[in-house]
Each structure stands twice: as structure tokens, then as C-alpha cells.
Amino acid sequence: VRAAAPDYLEGLNPEQREAVETTDGPVLVLAGAGTGKTRVLTTRLAHILATGKARPWELLAVTFTNKAAREMRERITAIIGPQAEGLRWLGTFHSVAAQILRKHAELVGLKSNYTILDQDDQERLIKQVLEAENVDAKRWPPKMLAGLIDHWKNRGWTPDKLPPAESAHFANNRGQALYRLYQERLRVLNACDFGDLLLHNLTIFTGHPDVLADYHERFRYLLVDEYQDTNVAQYLWLRLLAQKRQNVCCVGDDDQSIYGWRGAEVDNILRFERDFPGAKVIRLERNYRSTSHILAAASGLIAANKSRLGKTLWTEAEGGEKVIVRGVWDGEAESRLIADEIERAKKGGADKNPRKYRDMAILVRASFQMRAFEERFVMLQIPYTVVGGPRFFERAEIRDAHAYLRLIQSEDDDLAFERIVNVPKRGIGETTVQKLLQVARLNGVPAVAAARQVVLTDELAARTRTALANFLRDLDRWRAEAGRMPHPRLMEAVLEESGYTDALRLDKSPTAQGRLENLKELVQAMGNSENLQAYLEHVSLVMDMDRGPQADAVQIMTLHSAKGLEFPLVFLPGWEEGVFPSQRSMDESGEKGLEEERRLAYVGITRAREEARVSFAANRQVYGRWTSQLPSRFVDELPLANVEASSETGYYGGGPGMQQHGSRWDESPSFGAGYSSPGWKRAQASNYKGSHPGRQQVIEGEGRLVAVSESSAASAYKRGDRVFHIKFGYGHVRGVEGNKLTVDFDKAGEKKVIDSFVEKQA
Ligand code: ATP
Ligand code: MG
């Protein structure tokens, strides 16, 4: 008679249980979101320990983030108790590789107290190498080589193994030589960069079979979560370590591979079956996370991808809410809408239990989108945390930009001076800055004033003096301009003329593009304040909000950092062409890039347990210019049956007449899924304006909204009509020209507007 299964196996379905109990031999769990892959991995670890097959330090478990590793450790502790503390080798690829490298550093010419360089140091070092080799840094920026080296390391290529063709990507075929010199410099400095951690491990394992054999002995079982996002170097590392015992279990989902841009290879999934013959492949099909509409919406969306292995998913959680899709006027309206809904969900309602803030998450494609939400939350005092990164106004590039403004506003601001006097790098080094600050202290004047004195002397080397003089001249010019131009324009000019944006444009690191977008967003948002002073005050208020750890807070994060997580209520804003899918990924990687974006959308929707709410704005302001936005194709790809177009819109900002908005929208044609141009604009407009019976018609075909037709072309407005406009308020029509109206608004004065965006008043 078989003994009763231990508690931790109770409740697992047969496939999950198989994945847990097949401890020996290679196992690949390939399954969709929310099917319990991570749970299987955790339980498997606990099972191996509980059955005495291995001791904690004989297990190697790799997760995608340190946070995920911590959570896994906690869950295992809950199952097997304090024994879990001995799990020394539970961490990310990098953290485990760093531990191994410490032990054998001398085998790659390092000492065990080696330092790991950050990106800044790495670039400085590369710059030195390029200078020593007389490579023109203008044509061949250090950042570019840094990016290439990173890429090569992700592929497991040491300088010796670099394919000859790769060398051609830099400085007329000098890529390999420079890469080699850089590695030599690192060795002299007893340092390595991030990519080296794994690369050195590979060198050690392949060059020293005895060392590898020790690890074969030690690691009895290997486990990997989020396997679809491993890169080649990580895969090779894993293969080397698993080679002998073959007790390796990887769990992953090809539909959630979202790090292709960082070198991840979905092919590793196929490689696994080849390299570990006889691997048991287990598929999990039951989703335990989401209700059925959410799951069906996500499955329908991802079905549009061509390159996928394909899978079935089902849930017992039938019913539940449909995925709600809304169009709003602009980014601010979107943040208003979502903040309002968060407040409402927090209160609860007739048929809904109140939610905790922490049960709600906003998942954005790019960090610039966070600004509008953060400001709104500060205003309404909704507690929030930005997960996996700083808050918008705390980002380095935003602080830099503000430091420029502060210094323009007041020369006394020594902190601001220190922050940006050499950002971007203009050859005013740390020693010079210290000297200036010293002079300032001695004479009791601000640092800028001290600098003005010092440039007139021979205290500094000629080159430094010129650089400093140029900087001071720029500063004077900006200050003069501050009085003349609107402050967002000033910000723009400063960022351009200081070389700040240029430096970012040359920057090939993965974060550079995002930082540029953040700066654009900053310029855009500045327009909401009266003037420079008001703006800076506003910023200090926003920054001053209580920043202590908050137990209950709305979670804001990028889709990338939401991987593996789940929340009862998920907001997915900014589903617009160019934002999501991002323009850059489509431009740079075409169809492949688009498919990766779609996987990211799949990751987004599948984070939701009970409610998912997608939104898009008709307009975004970029550098102060309004651009109209097309709803994302992903909106289109959500199966109609699982989607509901909300009957409310995001705009509540109107006068008293807006109070009945609830019912106004009820008659409007259902919108939401079908925005095949050219009808989309109309469809969207119908959402803002309420109904114009007979004017728009939504045609349904094959389960999707496919087109919106227009039956009347003539404007429904005439001179003298009283109208309400979503942005400018009430006014009278003064002129009609096609679909353009000239309206004399009570508050905003005369404006030209599109008729779709106004509503006729009785
Ligand atoms: P992702 O692909 O998003 O990383 P996943 O496959 O790793 O998802 P898990 O996070 O492990 O999925 O599980 C999703 C949710 O389902 C969790 O809340 C988990 O506790 C729950 N779950 C998994 N398996 C079961 C089960 N057999 N019974 C009840 N709940 C389960
Ligand atoms: Mg998981």
C-alpha cells in the first residue's frame, strides 16, 4: 500500500505532479502562463529535499530576478522549514556565476577580491582603450563597442572565439583586437564586467575539467525558471553543469520570451531536447491564475504570432469579467480614469469587495508612461510603488535635467552645479570640481561664482579652463533665454545645447532609448505649470511625498518586470501603435520585433487574475506637439467575445453638463475592438461624444469588429450652435469648414477643433 502523499503534493494536478516527482533525468516543462510552472519548480525543490535525495547546498536553482529567488526561498521554507536556509545556490544566473568565479578567479587571471564594474566604469575603460589605440571616438563611440562586447559575451564568445565577421562591426575590422585589449585591461585592474561573470565561468569549466568535475559532484539537481529567456552563454553554462548527471529541470513558455533584444534565444527550448536526449517534456494546460475571459483574450492575441510552438490552455474559473477596453482623449485623461477606478475598487461596491491597493497593478510598455500616473497619485494621495526602478522624478536623467533648471533659476544651487557640471562629460573632472568647491568655501561664494573667478586664472589646465568657460557661457545664455521663452522650450534647448540628448543618442546601451523618452515626457509635462518657478516647486512637492516602504500600495512597473507576477486587477495603458507595439522594436526588428511585442502583451494580460483593463489615448503630446494616435493592433487582435468596450470614458473633467456621462455612453455604438482604419477615428470619436444615431455603424464579422462606416458626411454643426469640447469646455460655433469647427470658447477663447470631439448642447 502506498503511503499517503505528503501535504505539499496535494492539490497538484497529475501533470504537475509528474513534473515534481520525476526528479531524475532531464525534464522540460513547457507551458503557458499561470499553469503553475514556478509552483512546480518550488515544489520539486522541496520534494527533493524532503525525500533526502539531496542536501540544500547540492541544489542549483536559477530564477530570473533576485526577488524571485527570495520568494522561492520563502515558499520552500514554508514547505520544509529552516532547512531551506542552506540553499546557497539559489539565485540568478549572475549571482551564482559570481560565487563560482570568486572561488576560481585565479584560473582566469583575477584575484578572488575582483571588482565588478558598472556600466560607467566599463565605458570609461573602453574609452581609454580606444584613445590608446587612436580610434576616433567620434566615429566609433565607446558606448557602441560596449554594446557589441556585451552582445558577444551573451553569445559566449571570448576574443579568441569571436567569429571573424563580427570584428567588422567596429572600427574597420578592429573589433576583435580592441575586445582583446579591453579584456587585458580588465585583468590588470583585477576587474570584470557583468557579461564576464558567465563567460569566465565557461572558460574555467572548459579549460579545467577537474573543476567542472567538482561541480558535477556537487550539483545533484539543477532547476531553471523562465527558461525561454536564457541567452546562449547561460545555456552553455547550464549544459556544462548538467552534462554528467543530467538531472536538470527547466520550465518556460515560448510565448513569454521577451528578452530577444538582450540576446535571449527561444531556440534554447529546441536545443534542450537535442542536447539532453530522452528528455521528458511535460505540458501543463490548466491555468490556475485567471478567469476564462482573460485567458481567452490572451490566447486569442498570441495566436496571431507565427513563430510559436503552440499550446492549449483552459481554466475552471469560468465566467468572470471580460477584458475591458477603453479609449480616452489623452494621456492625462487615461491617468485620471485609472486613478478614479483604483479609488472605486478600493472602496468596493454593491457587488464587489473592496480591493487592497497592492492588489492592483499598472503595467506600462515604457517608463515614460509612468509620469502621468505618478503625478495623479501624488495629487490624490494614492500610495504607489514603482517596482524594479526609481520613480519617474527620481530617475537620473530627470534629476540631471532638473539640476540644469535649478542652476539656471539660481546660481547659488551648488548641489545642482556639482551634479551637472560634467554631465554630459565635458572634461571637467572630479579634481577640478573639488577645487572649485574649495574656492567657493574659502571665499564664501557659490560654486558658479567661484568658477567665474577661477576661469580667469591659470589654476586649471588650459583644456579644462576652456571647457569650464564654455559651460559658464552656456549657462549665461540659458539664463537670458529663460526670461524670453516658455520653460518647456528652454528645457528642450538646454538638453540639446548641453549635449545631453546627443550623448544619449550615441548611447547604445539598452536603457538609453528609454531615458530619451523620459526626457521627452518631462518636456511635455512641464507645460502643465505656469512658469519655471512654479514647475520646480511642483517637482519638489511631488518628490517630497512620503517615500517610506508602503505595505499597501498600487504597483507600477514595466511589462518586462511584471514577468512571473500576478495581480487581481491589472491596468494596461497606452495600447497605441508606436507606444505598444513600440516603434523602435518594429523599426529595428521588423516582424520579429512585432512578435516579441505581442508576447509582451500576452505577458501583460496573463498577469491578471480577475480583471484586466486595456486603454489607449487618441492623442499624445510629444515635445509639446499633439499627435493623434492609432489604437494598437493588439486591441484589434483581442477576440471580441472576450472584450467589453466600457460604457464610461476617461474624461470627467467637464463642467456640470458632464455629470450624466454614465448614461450618455450607453447608447453609443459598441467600440473597442475594431479600428481598421480609416474608420477607427470615427469609432473612437463615438466614444467621446456619445451617440449620433445613424452616423456610425459598427459592422461585425467573424467574431471581430472589422469596420466602422459613416453614413453622413456633412457636418452636423452650424454657426451659433452651443457645444461642449472635452478639453476647452463650452463655447459657440463661429464657423464650419468640413469637419473643422471654429469655436469661441467661454474660457479658452477661439480655437479650431475637429467636430468629432465636440458635443452639441441643447
Ligand atoms: P508564469 O508563466 O506567469 O510565470 P506560472 O506557470 O509560473 O506562470 P505559477 O505562478 O506557478 O504559474 O502559478 C499561477 C497561480 O496558480 C499561482 O497563484 C499558483 O499558486 C496557482 N496554482 C498553480 N498550480 C496550482 C494548483 N495545482 N492548485 C491551485 N493553485 C495552483
Ligand atoms: Mg512563473
Image (cartoon, grey):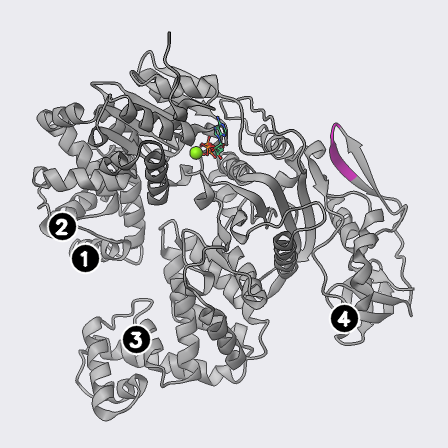
**Residue 742 place in picture, x, y as percent:** 81, 68
Query: Is disc 1's CB within 8 Å of ligand 2?
Result: no
Eyeballing the image, is 355 above or below 85?
below
Which of disc 1 and disc 3 is earlier in sequence?
A: 1
Q: Amino acid at mark 4?
A: Lys
Give the labeled residue for mark 1. Answer: 128
Residue type, label 1: Gln
Could you tell me which secondary element the residue under label 1 belongs to? Answer: helix
Q: Tell me the kind of residue under disc 3.
A: Glu
Along the horizontal axis of the image, is 373 left or right of 215? right
CA distance separating discs 3 and 1: 24 Å
Q: Which residues are magenta?
A: 702-707
Instruction: Look at the numbered discs 1 and 2 and tell me whether their residues touch, using CB distance below 8 Å.
Output: yes
Q: Is residue 652 above or below residue 510?
A: below
Residue picked out by circle 3: 418
Q: Are marks 3 and 1 in contact (CB under 8 Å)?
A: no
Q: Which mark is residue 185?
A: 2
Residue at disc 2, CB closer than 8 Å to ligand 2: no
